[in-house]
Image (tube, grey):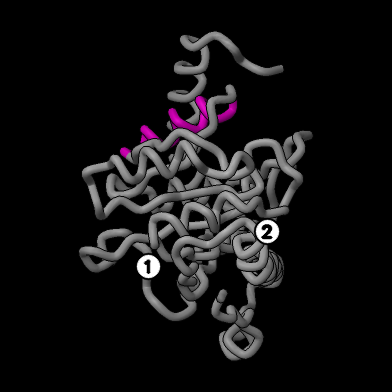
């Protein structure tokens, strides 16, 4: 059942935020960074801006572990986007209107108008409607137009509840293993045309798939070999 009433959405958002904050505190969490240290946000040097790209089903853990006032989430105008907006607000993150499956045009306009030039963006490139784990071109369009670096993110849970939604949205069970991996930031050349954007999306999709598989395996087994992670990094060729 979808909630349409804005007051009920607000109540549900506040209740969910409190419950999720308490839940995340119970998790057996670990984090692995490939290359540049990009989280927590306060560690990022002034003047650097990043687009953090993660699958829609796994957005809860990054928000509640690393959400920061210097970050904003890309939020659609659908009801699920409004609920996500309440969760973002609970950790003092900002919101940018738009979605990656519509090219990110609205997001570009808001980002370019934003006076806070140090704000980073969190996007779910398969959202808000899917297909699941299939990145839409909007994420590289945003990066190309704003010259923000893209950070692919992988997430995994040992045990989780799964919604019967298009993305099989994951809520970790209390006290389970939770793992997060951030990849090396990727530069998308400025001013790319549509065909070039689609070409630039291919290695990003591959890296997100790779990191998510590594994070899920790490969560299940409790083991991660950093040498194998670095040895199999996706190559991002320069886009002409």
- Percent of width and height locating residue 147: 39, 62
Q: Nearer the viewer, mark 1 or mark 2?
A: 1
- Percent of width and height locating residue 168: 74, 42
Q: In the figure, is residue 15 to the left or right of 57?
A: left
Magenta segment: does it hold 223? no
Snapshot quadrant of residue 114: top left
Instruction: In the rendered view, tell whether residue 122 sits above or below residue 178.
Output: above
- Percent of width and height locating residue 165: 75, 34
Magenta segment: does it hold 84? yes
Q: Mark 1: which secondary structure? A: loop
Residue pictured at 46% horizontal, 36% vertical: 106
Q: Between marks 1 and 2, how big is the CA–CA gap?
A: 24 Å
Residue highlighted by disc 2: 158
Which quadrant of the rendered structure holds the N terminus?
top right
Q: Magenta span covers which residues?
A: 80-92
Instruction: In the rendered view, tell whether residue 83 sits above or below residue 239.
Output: above
Q: Nearer the viewer, residue 187 or 211?
A: 187
Circle nearer the N terminus (1, 2): 1
Residue highlighted by disc 1: 38
SS majority, magenta: helix
Q: Determine if residue 25 is in view.
A: no
Residue pictured at 61% horizontal, 82% vertical: 235
Q: Determine if residue 157 is in view.
A: yes
Residue pictured at 61% horizontal, 85% vertical: 225
């Amino acid at each position: 059942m979808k909630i349409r009433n804005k007051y009920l959405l607000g109540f549900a958002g506040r209740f969910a935020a409190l419950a999720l904050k308490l839940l995340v505190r119970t998790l057996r969490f670990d984090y692995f960074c490939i290359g540049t240290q990009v989280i927590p946000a306060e560690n990022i040097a002034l003047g650097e801006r990043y687009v953090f790209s993660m699958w829609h089903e796994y957005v809860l853990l990054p928000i509640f572990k690393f959400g920061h006032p210097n970050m904003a989430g890309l939020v659609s105008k659908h009801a699920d986007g409004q609920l996500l907006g309440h969760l973002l607000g609970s950790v003092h993150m900002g919101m940018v209107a738009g979605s990656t499956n519509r090219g990110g045009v609205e997001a570009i306009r808001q980002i370019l108008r934003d006076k806070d030039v140090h704000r980073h963006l969190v996007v779910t490139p398969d959202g808000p409607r899917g297909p699941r784990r299939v990145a839409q071109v909007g994420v590289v369009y945003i990066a190309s137009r704003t010259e923000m670096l893209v950070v692919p993110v992988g997430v995994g849970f040992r045990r989780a509840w799964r919604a019967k939604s298009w993305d099989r949205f994951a809520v970790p069970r209390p006290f389970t293993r939770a793992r997060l991996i951030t990849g090396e930031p990727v530069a998308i050349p400025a001013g790319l045309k549509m065909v070039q954007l689609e070409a630039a999306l291919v290695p990003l999709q591959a890296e997100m798939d790779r990191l998510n598989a590594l994070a899920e395996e790490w969560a299940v087994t409790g083991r991660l070999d950093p040498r194998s992670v670095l040895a199999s990094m996706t190559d991002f060729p320069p886009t002409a």
